[in-house]
Image (cartoon, rainbow, N blue to C red):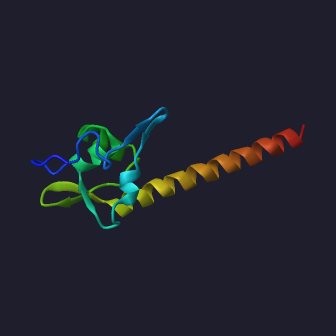
Amino acid sequence: MCAESGTPDAGSEAGPLPDALGILIAALAELPEKAILDEARLAHLFHVSPRTVRRMVGRFELPPPVSLGGRSVWMAGRIVEHIDAAAERKQRVAERQARQFRETLGNQ
């Protein structure tokens, strides 16, 4: 933990954990649901720049922030819920496509 900024060091557990396939963002799921994250902290957790966080919001990959004291902030629980909902939507689409594919094969 960096004493000056209070942010985790590069090797800290709060950041993404690199592996052969990419990064694992376990720290987000481990935060209290009501934990408030500013843009810089969220960027650190996702191992991206603050600008990329704004782009992710624009692409609906993250929920829109709430303004608090003139800063964009997110609640950890809402981010996890947003990601869960997106994963469920993708799963339903994949299941529907698989069903349509099976039906197409059955009609031949």
- Is the residue 19 above or below the residue 100 in the image? above
Viewer-closest of 90 and 6: 6
Viewer-closest of 25 and 76: 25
Instruction: Give me the residue at 16% from left, 51% from top.
Output: 6
In the image, taking residue 75 as reference, residue 87 lies left or right, namely right
Residue 17, by quadrant, is top left
Instruction: Give me the residue at 28% from left, 45% from top.
Output: 12
Q: Position of residue 64 (x, y in %)?
A: 32, 54
In the image, taking residue 5 as reference, residue 83 lies left or right, namely right
Residue 50, by quadrant, is top left
The residue at the far top in this view is: 20
In the rendered image, which quarter contains the C terminus? top right
Viewer-closest of 45 and 56: 45
Q: Position of residue 22 (x, y in %)?
A: 45, 35
Viewer-closest of 107 and 88: 88
Q: Position of residue 46 (x, y in %)?
A: 34, 43
